[in-house]
Image (cartoon, rainbow, N blue to C red):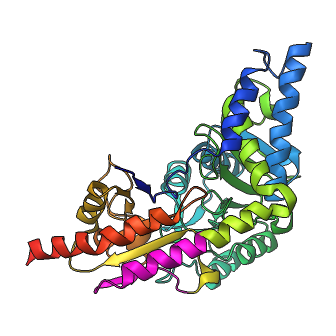
Amino acid sequence: MTRAYLDHASTTPPRPEALAALIRWMALPAADPGRLHQEGRTVRDALEEARQQVAWLVGATPREIVFTSGGTESINAAVWGATRRRPGAPVLCADVEHSAVRDASARLAPTEVLPVDGAALVQTDALEARLRATDVPRPALVHCQWANHEVGTLQPVRETVRLCRDAGVPVHVDAAAACGHVPLDLDDLGADLVSLSAHKIGGLPGAGALVVRRGSRFEPLIVGGEQERARRAGLEALPALLAFGAAAAALGDDGQRLLRSEARSARRHIDALETAATAVPGVELVGPRAEDQRLPSLLCLGVHGVEAEPVLLGLDRAGVAVHSGSACSSESIEPSPVLEAMGVDAANSLRVSVGWSTTDDDVAAFAGAFADVVAALRALRS
């Protein structure tokens, strides 16, 4: 059976450019890029090229890019660095943030919840009021994701960063869900810390980056060496990082032509998926409805009258892979806190997401299976 993979928001297949970078790595000397001999310098040149490629994609300078093992480490490093500067000060975080953001913050500092509306949009008026308050401690850090990973909401990152900069409070932006799908210009944004993940853009698992704005003081999470300009110890994971750079270069080349082309294709696929899904009675869009308020590559559906987990399993048997809002992973049975914060029943929510390798046949496979799966499950309930 030819399968249709529609869970790109979880991870997307490696791009050909990323796989080609692995072949390039195999031809490099087996050397430490921190060494001064010729072999070390050769490897260092390849690593710095990858750093430049990632920087170009997101509109940062190479010196601001700290390579990590992935988005989760980048987030933990951001929280660690910010809270170490002001121990005991609170961290402001909406419940719609990724679990890595929420859990890392709760472990290291008191957390205060920023309110969101029914579309998962962070309420900047509440943030502004909190930042202006003089009878409570000044926050150590404010989180604002660029795009929501469950429903695709594009957050008011520019307004959030402006408010935090005016208040003198560091701000971290989780851009893992947005990078590779919408243009990022971090130099213009001005956030203190931005986390990125390679496998979300067609790189390999095991690579990511924390963008540390020039002039920001930053205490590293991982110590024990002088790698990454003493901002992240440990020998760099060269294969995954070179693949990260290659994927970023593919998207950022020629004025981000490929990124914009893929975004248009993703929007077309998502529109077709939404049309097919909402043609089934009792199925509706969850999250923002306006295209300029959500990612072009992600669709969250509310399926009334049946739980989403059986729908996911029915689609899986039909050869279609999607994600359910009722659990973050196969190891968890907890409902999505994102959907709960929105007031949405996570047990009835289904996430469908597309990527660079999605085809019209993938969309057709979903359209051909979804109605039958939902109808069969509703029949069982009745």
Above-or-below relation of 81 to 362:
above
Residue at 71%, 42% in the rendered image? 17
Q: Is residue 182 visible?
A: no
Residue 88 falls within the magenta-colored stretch:
no
Q: Is residue 128 visible?
A: yes
Above-or-below relation of 19 to 109:
above
> Residue 328 at x, y = what percent?
39, 55
Pick the front one: 103 or 49 = 49
Pick the front one: 323 or 116 = 323
Total marks placed: 0
Pick the front one: 252 or 368 = 368
Residue 286 falls within the magenta-colored stretch:
yes
Residue at 82%, 41% in the rendered image? 51
Residue at 62%, 56% in the rendered image? 176
Above-or-below relation of 174 to 371:
above
> Residue 259 at x, y = what percent?
73, 62
Span colored in magenta: 266-289
> Residue 166 at x, y = what percent?
81, 74
Q: Is residue 90 left or right of residue 193?
A: left
| Image quarter (top left, top right, bottom left or bottom right) of the C terminus | bottom left
> Residue 24 at x, y = what percent?
76, 28
Residue 246, quarter of the rendered image: top right
